[in-house]
Image (spheres, grey):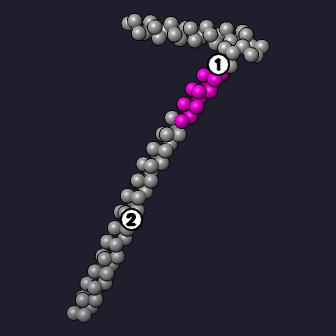
Amino acid sequence: MSNILEAIHSLEDKLQTLLSNYEFLKKENEILLQNTTNFQHKILEQQQFIVDQKRAFDVLKVAKAIDGSGTNTRDTKLKINTLIREIDKCIIQLQD
């Protein structure tokens, strides 16, 4: 009879250990999921920042080309023509 009681107590101890491990791992998983969400949000912010910076860089390139301070008058004319075509496309889309 005492073997059965010892086995039951041993089983209860192991079950208690498993439950505490489960709770710990559950909390750790929640923390890791929250961290993952935070990192994904930061990645999206950084990607948007990169897009904004590329856009600003392109605008700066166009502004420098339009400035005409360099010897690239041909490039400046091509940029202006490209901008005019893009504006014309936008106007056509707005009229539809």
Does the magenta segment cover residue 82? no
- Residue 18's image quarter? bottom left
Looking at the rendered image, the disc whose residue lies closer to the viewer, 2 or 1, is 1
Of the numbered discs in the image, which one, if any, rests on residue 71? none
Q: Position of residue 10 (x, y in %)?
A: 31, 84
Tell me if 67 is positioned left or right of 95 in this view: right
Q: Main secondary structure of the magenta part?
A: helix
> Mark 1 sits on what residue?
63
**Which quadrant: the N terminus?**
bottom left
**Helix, strand or loop at mark 2:** helix
Give the amino acid at mark 2: Leu
Up the image or down, 85 lies above or below 16; here it is above
Tell me where the magenta segment starts and ends, as one range: 49-61
**Helix, strand or loop at mark 1:** helix
- Residue 31's image quarter? bottom left
Up the image or down, 44 lies above or below 55; here it is below
Q: Residue at x 31, y 71 (%)?
A: 19
Give the amino acid at mark 1: Ala
- Residue 20's image quarter? bottom left
Of residues 78 and 5, the one nearer the viewer is: 78
For mark 2, does the 10 Å Cα neighbourhood hold few (<14), some (14 to 19), or many (20 or more) residues? few
Tell me if 75 is positioned left or right of 19 in this view: right
Residue extending farthest left? 1
- 2 or 1: tag closer to the N-terminus: 2
* Marks 2 and 1 close (CB-CB < 8 Å): no
Distance between the alpha carbons at the discs numbered 2 and 1: 56 Å
> Mark 2 sits on what residue?
25
**Which quadrant: the C terminus?**
top left
Q: Position of residue 4 (x, y in %)?
A: 24, 88
Q: Position of residue 64 (x, y in %)?
A: 68, 19
